[in-house]
């Protein structure tokens, strides 16, 4: 590669760095950054990283093991596998990031983790379509409605829906996947905000456990299972994007989800389709039935709540910050 | 992949996790880990990671940018490139880890960063050999001695030496590298602890800047240069492994090393070979000359100092710890 131009010896002078002075000096050299938000993020990152090393007195072997673990996470990742999302999931970070960014006012549908299996190639299907081609799955009819906190239907919402097949695998986990399966996109109805589709009854499944994250879970004595659930993502201009899941009540992993996604308000009971419903939706009587209403919050209301929460939380932490583009930067910058 | 056996619903029950309770609950589920050292490391890691997210109110976009950055670091890494070592280097972590693990009593040679360019295939050469095949380099004679803090020679030390060529690249950075160059291994002399070799005068060089770490440095407004130096690693049973470098005085990047490696005690002055030295070592008069003594510390003395420093530092941090195999774990565990 071509060498970059030599620069003047810019930056603060740094010499004789030690266990104690390395942190302020790393922050001092990073303070050359022109972007106040990135500068703040780096200052917090370096401080926590160094404090972590000092509090653990991390050994050279442990440090190298960690760096090699990170390389392995990158190298097993692909177009259809993101091991760092999985790592973030099992460390509780994904749930935390979702909670910070998508606060939910009382009465709205709570969020859950996105997970690493959402794709952008799901077909858009008409209401009533089947999104599964798995003959071994137990048929499930889902009849849902999208509404606002005042009960009004929200039409024209793009709804992404995805689940595993009956073996507990997403389509992308099968080698030689040629087309999407157990996933679709629907639009909520123009009049009533409704959408309905046929899928299969979700099953518990292990998160990918053949990679570095799976090995870490094993070392931690944790299982790698998720309770049975259906994923949903709701998008419409002016509304806060809702990423959530519905969890089947009574699953053996209901309270020990490997990725911390379950919330009481998202646990649902399946019913059986009765004669009237069977006639209305053209499915067999006795088919599994899930009825659920999703409540979206406007982007403006969410942004206002997120900002208010941020200001309050940072004050509690004793940090003197202001929000720029809704993101905190130090006040005295 | 085969599904792992379903387990009983083991682990503490976790439900309704929020910005505030996700951290103790993640630590609670990780507390199932049977290894007290790993348990402690994970507890500190999760706490710092979550505090970082809460203090920055990190956005979903920033989080995803970070996860994709980590994937890119893994994917550019190879047998001859370790982007995570480079990342650790530019964040000051490598220097910190070295300082924690290899404390140096007064009078001994200080450590510096290993960097990502040490290999295990350097040839073992006889004293006086040339370790460079670069005709464009300015010839340099290095005459060194390994001794203990009381001035006694330490014979039979395996000394790894590596530097860039005159273009500022390590051999592994050239495509199609067939054999090692600008690197060798020597043994310190049986009688006097001496070793001497012919290399080339080191030059300043940019760390690899075509990958994610280089892009990060650019965003931070930092240059990617290292001041001219020669790498050394000393290994002998019973002696603490010394990883260090010698830096050429007056380099334009002497006080702004991109990876924080420079220490005043490691900055050296080059001389010119006089007639007597030229005759003794069989090099031309006027050749660049570097004379240096390296002072090693015994493994036992280092371990004792490292343990003492750890206990003191952890007490200062208010942490109630004990050392097991020289590594801290919580006292009340």
Image (cartoon, coloured by chain):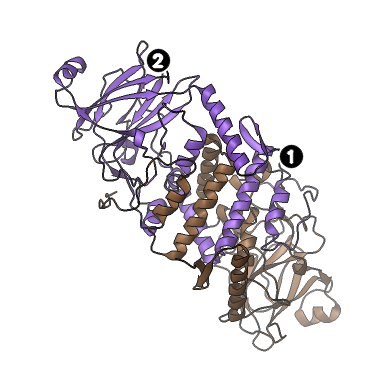
Chain colours: A brown, B purple
Q: CA distance from mark 1 to mark 2?
A: 45 Å
Estimate the x, y position of residue A186 in percent, counting from the top left: 63, 76
User: Badge 1: how crowded within 10 Å, few (<14), some, or many (20+)?
Assistant: few
Circle number at residue B152: 2
Asked whether residue A211 appears in the rendered view, the answer is no
Chain label for disc 2 = B
* Residue A152 position (above or below residue B118): below
Circle number at residue B332: 1
**Circle 1 — which element?**
loop
As rendered, which of B220 and A209 lies closer to the eye? B220
Horizontally, residue B157 falls left or right of residue A261, namely: left
Q: Which residue is depicted at the point 67% across and 89% down?
A: A191
Estimate the x, y position of residue B93 in percent, counting from the top left: 48, 44
**Circle 2 — which element?**
loop
Residue B119, picture quadrant:
top left
Estimate the x, y position of residue A193 in percent, counting from the top left: 68, 84
């Amino acid at each position: 590669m071509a060498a970059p131009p030599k620069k003047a010896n810019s930056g603060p002078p740094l010499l004789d760095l030690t266990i104690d002075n390395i942190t302020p000096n790393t922050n001092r050299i990073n303070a050359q950054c022109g972007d106040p938000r990135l500068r703040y993020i780096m200052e917090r990152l370096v401080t926590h990283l160094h404090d972590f090393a000092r509090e653990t007195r991390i050994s050279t072997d442990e440090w190298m093991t960690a760096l090699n673990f990170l390389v392995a996470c990158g190298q097993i990742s692909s177009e259809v596998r993101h091991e760092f999302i999985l790592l973030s999931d099992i460390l509780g970070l994904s749930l935390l990031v979702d909670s910070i960014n998508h606060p939910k006012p009382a009465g709205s549908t709570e969020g859950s983790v996105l997970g690493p299996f959402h794709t952008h190639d799901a077909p858009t299907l008409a209401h009533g379509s089947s999104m599964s081609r798995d003959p071994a799955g137990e048929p499930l009819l889902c009849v849902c409605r999208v509404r606002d906190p005042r009960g009004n239907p929200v039409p024209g919402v793009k709804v992404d829906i995805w689940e595993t097949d009956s073996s507990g695998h997403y389509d992308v986990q099968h080698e030689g996947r040629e087309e999407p399966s157990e996933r679709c996109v629907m639009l909520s109805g123009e009049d009533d905000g409704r959408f309905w589709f046929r899928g299969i009854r979700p099953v518990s499944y292990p998160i990918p456990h053949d990679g570095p994250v799976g090995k870490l879970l094993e070392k931690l004595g944790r299982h790698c299972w998720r309770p049975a659930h259906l994923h949903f993502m709701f998008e419409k201009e002016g509304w806060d994007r809702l990423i959530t899941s519905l969890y089947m009540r009574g699953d053996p992993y209901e309270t020990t989800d490997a990725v911390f996604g379950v919330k009481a308000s998202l646990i649902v009971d399946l019913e059986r389709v009765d004669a009237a419903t069977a006639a209305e939706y053209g499915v067999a009587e006795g088919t599994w039935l899930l009825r659920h209403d999703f409540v979206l919050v406007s982007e403006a209301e969410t942004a206002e709540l997120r900002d208010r929460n941020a200001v309050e939380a940072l004050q509690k932490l004793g940090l003197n910050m202001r929000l720029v583009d809704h993101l905190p930067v130090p006040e005295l910058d």
